[in-house]
Image (cartoon, rainbow, N blue to C red):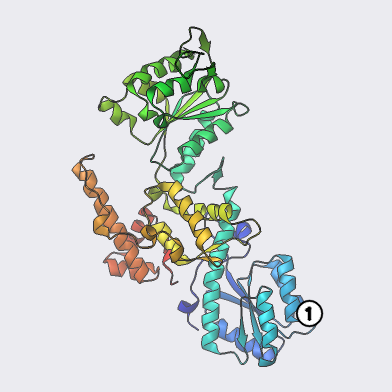
Amino acid sequence: MTTALLNPERLSNHAQAEARSDTISIPRRILIVEDEDDDRRHLHSLLAADRDIQIESTSNARDALSLLDEKAYSIVLTDLRLPGLDGMEFIQEIQRAGHAVTIIIMTGDSTIQEAVKAIRNGAYDFLLKPIDLDYLKLVIRRALRERELQDQVRYLRAQLQSTYSFQNILSKNPHMHSLFELISNVAYSNTTVLIEGETGTGKEQVARAIHTTSPRSSKALVAVNCAALPEGLLESELFGHEKGAFTSAVGQRRGRFEVANGGTLFLDEVGDVPAGMQAKLLRVLQERRFERVGGTETIEVDVRVIAATNRSLQKLVNEGKFRQDLYYRLNVVKIDLPPLRDRSEDIPLLVTHFIERYTRPGETLKQISPRVMEMLINYRWPGNIRQLENTIERACITARGQLILPENLPAEIASPPSAASQYEITLDRPLPQVVRDIVAGIEEQYLRQALKKTQGNVSRGARVCGLSRRCMTAKMSEYKLDKAVFKEV
């Protein structure tokens, strides 16, 4: 058996305990449980030909359970007829102990019905004796691939509320982790914060993280979508109104600033505040006082303001569409949220999180096929995290089995447009910047095709690209390309 046939990397069973950094680095082990000495030695010899896999063997289930308690194994290859504790009881004990290991049964013709029963009880597959070598290779190769996927998912779930989670924001991206630190530092002050980022990048989630971490967390976080309200209604929404202030004002109403007193006011899409309202908003930010619409009483409030926009306020200032003094008042501490396409390493983490959210209660969590994960990582996500969440919700609903397949994805993700149609030429940016972005996009696609052709082999991929291996590795790092994604599905 060649090394290439059993080549998936980073397999584990106890991923959280034995993982290093943000990758799984458990040795791949196969445990053979066979009471016939000759058969056991023969299987051991065949599988040991692959030096990347550690092979261990024992003659009975009791010893095997002890070994499973001591070490992490990827596969247990066991006979169904064993002395003492038989194969069926062995499977049940493995399940009861919670060992995350793939079980493959070896059986004779007389026990095929029991093998089928064993699969229903949690075994992965069965092999008929005498063992066919080619089929053994196929089953083990397939089992290792699926074991890798399950271990990666288990590892990511273990990380969701620890290493990569901050106030319900999930990321393993270094830039995002620096933002986590900034959020922690700014949360304990009353400083006004401006959050800029594309639609769907999680601006409100960041605002909630700031509020939750702050001393104001026991008070309300009040959100206002400034783009959803016309100027007259927005003024009443923010500052409230007195009875009779206008035709429909049948009673006094408190505005959002009053409701948020002692807490935090989140002004979403602040770049869409009409010009007439910008002066009034500036005064409140400066003085923390205002009058209700139609009223004369001055109301003072203690409010922490967080503003967000999917547009560049600096650009709006340059175009004369946004007051410069209001911009400076809002832009005390600025948080720039990167789009999802610039933090593609977060996609597996977010996918795992959304699968947990949208799997129905009582159902087994769905799994993502390696091909689907590759599609999700390659896609550019114009709608960012919100679009990814909607995609996974749809996939969980439409997947008939436990595995999410390409047909469960929207057409624009499963069959993206050609490279030539991906670049929209506008005059919003300087030509050199546009050219750099287009060249980078083409280069990334070229690298992906090369890695796909070579099934993630970096050296062969470098030869296809006409690059040195060192240059290939550097470019893979630059574009955050993980060779494991391109392994043969």
Q: Residue at x 56, y 45 (%)?
A: 165
Task: Provide residue 30's location: percent of width, then percent of height.
Answer: 61, 76
Q: Could one spot residue 224 in this view of the protein?
A: yes
Task: Provide residue 244's location: percent of width, then percent of height.
Answer: 48, 13
Q: Nearer the viewer, residue 24 or 100?
A: 100
- Label 1 amino acid? Leu
Quarter placement of the C terminus: bottom left
The quarter of the picture where residue 77 lies is bottom right
- The residue furthest top is 296
CA neighbours of label 1 inside 10 A, class few (<14), some (14 to 19), many (20+) = some
Residue 382 relative to residue 23: left or right: left
Task: Provide residue 374's location: percent of width, then percent of height.
Answer: 42, 62
Residue 143 relative to residue 238: left or right: right
Q: Residue at x 44, y 65 (%)?
A: 407
| Figure check: 136 above or below 403 | below
User: Label 1, on which residue?
Assistant: 85
Report helix, strand or loop for mark 1: loop
